[in-house]
Image (cartoon, rainbow, N blue to C red):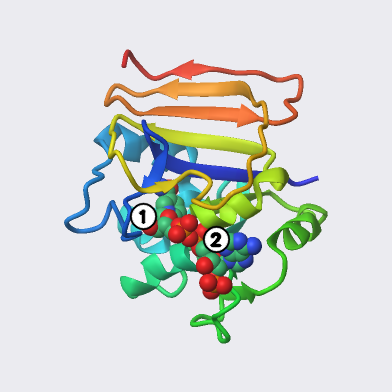
Amino acid sequence: MRKLVYFIASTLDGFIAGPDGSDPTGPGGFWSPSEDYIQHLIEEYPETLPGPARAALGITAEGVRFGTVIEGRKSYEVGLAAGVTDAYPHLEHLVFSRTLTQSPDPGVELVDGDPAAKVRELKHRDGKDIWLVGGGGLAGALHDEIDRVIVKLSPLTIGSGIPLFGRTAAFAPHAWELTDHTVLKGGAVFLTYDRNPGATRSSSTAGPA
Ligand SMILES: NC(=O)c1ccc[n+]([C@@H]2O[C@H](COP(=O)([O-])OP(=O)(O)OC[C@H]3O[C@@H](n4cnc5c(N)ncnc54)[C@H](OP(=O)(O)O)[C@@H]3O)[C@@H](O)[C@H]2O)c1
């Protein structure tokens, strides 16, 4: 069965964006990924780069991990504000919203039902794993359905912002097992945690932190 993977950039203090919800990595943003961070994404997670970035970098390869991407309406609108109606044309792309009535792009499917029910349906389809982009609000609603969390931890603290699971998630403690990690020289750490880990465990270190 396909996994739901929350693949998400986080500050050291557990935030995925600043308080105003604008794009922290955009022009004038406070979050500048290091070169080795970008390189690691290109090498290990090329399908998670938006279409325009893939085109600029000449990346055409299909991803090995994800076949479907899902996101909340507010995360989707970050791309829309930059004029990108489908940031992931190379993946099946679903956006959860109860207010959008018409998809701005034929490649983007709007879903207004219960996210957990939709994810359970998606998991039973054949294909590669499902990438939960975020944001925190949707992740909070899908907490019970997430099988793997890959945190791209940046050496940055911001004090206040949108938490990893949003501001309104229910209190529901879950234990996770660390199944992979990569430490980058620029100070970022990629941490993979599984809810129900299989027999395989791996780790890698790209250099001293
Ligand atoms: N650090 C990262 O890697 C990363 C990744 C993605 C996003 N982000 C950031 O995250 C921020 C957006 O996150 P967010 O938490 O504010 O919003 P979000 O989770 O992206 O979107 C929330 C919206 O999803 C829709 N939704 C549908 N069903 C829902 C349900 N059951 N529970 C919750 N939402 C549901 C609703 O849209 P309607 O109101 O239309 O019904 C809701 O307003 C942006 O600042 C973005 O830059 C960061």
> Which residue is at a point 34% across and 16% down the rendered structure image?
207
Q: The disc labelled 2 sits on which kind of residue?
A: Glu
Report the mark closest to the observer, 2 or 1. Answer: 2
Considering the image in quadrants, where does the N terminus appear? Answer: top right
Residue under pointer 1: 58
Q: Is residue 198 left or right of residue 185?
A: right
Percent position of residue 4, x then y: 67, 46
In this rendering, the answer to whether 184 lies above or below 102 is above
Pick the front one: 2 or 143: 143
Q: Which residue is mark 2?
A: 71
Q: Is residue 173 left or right of residue 63?
A: right
Is residue 51 left or right of 67 when viewed as pictured? left
Give the residue displayed 55% in from the left and 53% down from the top: 168
The residue at the point 72 percent across, 26 percent down is 197
Residue 135, position as x, y percentages in the image: 49, 55
How much space separates mark 2 and mark 1, taking CA atoms?
25 Å
Residue count near mark 2 (Cα–Cα under 10 Å), binned few <14, some 14–19, many ≥20: many
